[in-house]
Amino acid sequence: MDNELIASHFDEMAELLEIRGESTFRVRAYRNGAKSIRDLTESVASILADPNRKLTDLPTIGDAISEKCKVLLETGKIPQLEELRKEVPAGLLQIMRVPGLGAKKAKALYESLNITNIDELRAACEQKKVRELKGFAAKTEESILKSLDQLASTSARMLLDEASYLVESLRKHLQVIPSIKQLEFAGSYRRGKETVGDLDIVIVSKHPDAAMDQLNSFPRLQEVLARGDTKMSIRVHGGFQVDMRVVPAESFGAAMQYFTGSKEHNVEIRGRAKKLGLRINEYGVYREEDLDHPIAGETEESVYAAVQLPWIAPELRESRGEFEMAEQGRLPQLITLADLRGDLHMHTTATDGENTLEEMVAAAQARGWEYIAITDHSQRVSVARGLDGTRLRAQWQEIDRLNEKLEGRFWIFKGIECDILEKGGMDLPDDVLAEADWVLASVHFGQQQPREQITDRILGAIRHPSVSCVAHPTGRLLGRRPPYEVDLDAVMQAAQEHGKLLELNSNPARLDLHDIHCQMAAARGIPLVINSDAHSIHHFDLLKFGILTARRAQLEATAVWNTLSCDELKKRLANLKQP
Ligand code: DGT
Ligand code: CA
Ligand code: CA
Ligand code: ZN
């Protein structure tokens, strides 16, 4: 059993206990335990197997969790969790995740109106029963209904990080079968789409049954939806579907091409094949007059070559002009993770980060980066203990000292993620901001303001002489919160005029700006920066999702400033500050 699966058991325990009204202390213990396990770089099983080591030596893992890990690994179950599952209706978990509700309200809805699932919740809101309850109001009812509409349109899809956890556990589980010669994930996951409907596995094997039997024993399996000779579909706990196809080696490229999609891309490639007297399907490329002998299909390259095109990167396969580019030899040299030389948005223990300044620096150096910017929150974000001018200047002194110690091997830019106030204007005095190397401007409050007001606030920030960049410019949270009503065209116009940057925030729930907006910004010559918004050293890993989005936006490295050398970046940031 891998760490991810173990962690998901403890997350579920935390949620169920929270609904039952257990102490926040106990709930948090399970949640922190789940997180520790997820962040481990070795398996829980191997630690338990080592007589010289104890799980309780890990941070946030006490006896209770350690014991449950042992039981879970031995029996595949946690008895207390089984009990909780029986006690708490499963639908309540979904209800507590509705934005604005949480565990307490879910519990109240259950106890007073016997609401046990989303449909009953919607009905009760529509019948105006919810506003009668203590702690609820007519306004709550309206906002619940709005959230439910929002959920209905996205909740059935996985975020990229959820998808990649599931991909890794499936990969580990399947690759032990010797008759599986190749195993790749196709579909929207391979195209790096921001949400993924289901996973599509393509396998090369002469023994489809062995592969399917192994999928059948996947620990997260909930039910088998269909099983044929070479095709199988399952549903895993959490509700997501996984489709598997087993193909012969000579069809692997054709199958990958077909199942990677997108559908629109495939329609277009088939059209091209037709004009050449060819036919393409998931088994290969054929001449119309001889459908028994494929002329290509073992590799994707061979499939594209058969229609006289170079291979097209999966992220581009959305029927957004990639065929014309391929034909004219204009395919972009897409940016890669290795192009990044630093990260310009992160938090430390000074505010709501989990690691110290030094730890962030060490982790960044370990990745081979040349620089980072520290951008803790400003004072308005009081829940995160945002920095005022005095604390910020103290942090900058520490950065000066560290920079000196690093002797040019690495550089820390003095930054801040400064809030744009509700009434407009920046959250820190001009003289403080003027001393920063890098100022991210962010909206965290008053996100629901009308279009003109919120747009004016952001435009004001862009015009501010010390602001370098707008962070997560639309504020959307996938599946949870729609973007601000901001006039993005006006924002881009202003950024272009003032030479300011826009951020592609790599947090998988944000991916903000999204692919199409990034492409629009780059086309206007607006410089972009791809940031992790790390709140811990582990979050640097999130950059891979930002890179996927950037590739879908057809970006090359030159469009993104944190691919620049440290010297060049210093120069450009200094120039930004010229009035
Ligand atoms: P998703 O799962 O909703 O995020 O999106 P996809 O693109 O992964 O879609 P999915 O899983 O339904 O199918 C995977 C790929 O297989 C899809 O991108 C293209 C191909 N495909 C599936 N059904 C059809 C079809 O009816 N016609 C064609 N041409 N291709 C199909
Ligand atoms: Ca899919
Ligand atoms: Ca599928
Ligand atoms: Zn941030």
Image: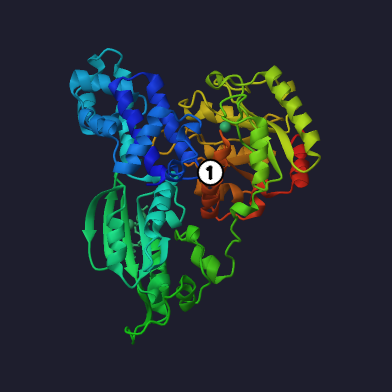
Pinpoint residue 231: horizontal percent, then vertical percent: 27, 64
Q: Nearer the viewer, residue 406 or 571?
A: 406
Q: Nearer the viewer, residue 46 or 442?
A: 46
For residue 351, side relative to residue 318 (left or right): right
Quadrant hosting ligand 1: bottom left
Pinpoint residue 20: horizontal percent, then vertical percent: 28, 22
Pinpoint residue 322: horizontal percent, then vertical percent: 50, 63
Q: Which residue is mark 1?
A: 542
Disc 1 marks which amino acid?
Leu
Instruction: Tell me the SS state at disc 1.
Output: helix
For residue 520, side relative to residue 81 (left or right): right
Q: Nearer the viewer, residue 410 or 508?
A: 410
The colour scheme of the drawn protein is rainbow
Residue farthest front in this picture:
51
Question: What residue is drawn where x is 22% and y is 54%?
Answer: 225
User: Could you say which quadrant of the image residue 407 lies in?
Assistant: top right
Question: What residue is drawn where x is 31% and y is 70%?
Answer: 207
